[in-house]
Amino acid sequence: MHLTFRQLQVFESVARQQSFTRAAKELHLSQPAVSMQIKQLEGAVGLPLFEQLGKQIHLTEAGSVMLQFSRRIAGDLREAEVAIEELKGVESGRLRVSVATTVNYFAARLLARFCNQFPGVRVSLDVANRQAVLHQLEENSVDIVLMGQPPGGLEVEAEAFMDNPLVVIAPPTHPLVGRRRVPLSALATETFLIREPGSGTRSAMERFFADKGIAPRISVEMTSNEAIKQSVEAGLGLGVVSNHTVELECDAGRLRVLDVRSFPIKRKWYLVHRRGKRLSAAANAFRDFVLNEGGNVKDHARNRKRKAIG
């Protein structure tokens, strides 16, 4: 078979997305270009790789076999890239990092300090929701992930590097603002804005309230912490978010953290990668940097803010 890695890359994207249109968008190609790559690959294989049933496309038996091997080839190429990057060393390596949306609030500071220390490293940063991050781990398409609760059922190495307390936020005019030691029962009649299904923050919130026998009202599901913060500020309800994500809003007087009994919910942020993964010199340097300096990022930011005010 005479085929190219680009054809396999396009094929894998179409198979994963189950759509030529979504694959074209992901790969920054036109849909006709994607269709042409698949047609050429099917010509090289000698069998159809997809079949269309109604409006949905599905892998044929030959397509399922090709998908296994295309992913294996992509993994081998990534391993080769890591081996080459190790020869280059930290001074000129490449680092692929993916962070959950909540972690993004401090990941930029962390990466800025890392890049200042290792200016020759080329960093690729992807900010995604939990489901997308889990997919990247499963596909081994990134070096390191920064996230909340590590996944179960997937062989990974996970190391905690920073506390991630979850707090209840409210608009400044809410009647519970300013009260000390608010009982959990007072939240039973409150409306809560929550993250989408699969979110680590949502899972932690639901487990917490279930353990306490509280069933708060849920009004709206939202796909980002920014949307929750803006909606809480507008008075649509209360929210449960990472305390690290609301510092600016609280300093500006736009949001308040409620003093609720049994809060904050204690969680941690983790540095995660696939178990047995061969980390490049740059990835190892970033791992060591995060584990040694990650907990100090917030303190450095607070000190800079104090100096600016002073």
Image: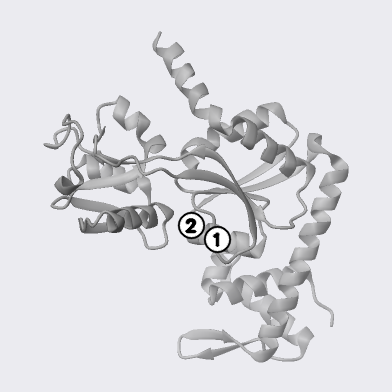
Quadrant including the N terminus: bottom right
Q: Nearer the viewer, residue 276 or 107?
A: 276
Q: Quadrant of residue 154?
A: bottom right
Q: Position of residue 271 (x, y in %)?
A: 60, 46
Write down the residue under mark 1: 134
Please state if 70 lies on the left or on the right of 202 as rendered. Answer: right
Amino acid found under the numbered disc labelled 2 = Arg
Amino acid found under the numbered disc labelled 1 = Leu
Q: Which mark is residue 235?
A: none
Write down the residue under mark 2: 130
Q: Which residue appears at 38% of the width and 53% of the height?
A: 204
Q: Mark yes or no: residue 7 visible.
A: no
Please say if 233 is above or below 77.
above
Q: Are marks 2 and 1 in contact (CB under 8 Å)?
A: yes
Q: Which residue appears at 61% of the width and 59% of the height?
A: 137
- In the displayed image of the protein, which residue is found farthest to the right? 87
Q: Position of residue 285 (x, y in %)?
A: 73, 37
Q: Quadrant of residue 302?
A: top left
Q: Please, what secondary structure does the residue beneath circle 1 have?
A: helix
Q: Nearer the viewer, residue 73 or 161?
A: 161
Q: Which residue appears at 31% of the width and 46% of the height?
A: 240
Please say if 25 is above or below 224.
below
Q: Position of residue 86 (x, y in %)?
A: 84, 45
Q: How many marks?
A: 2
10 Å neighbourhood of mark 1: few (<14), some, or many (≥20)?
some
Quadrant including the C terminus: top left
10 Å neighbourhood of mark 2: few (<14), some, or many (≥20)?
many
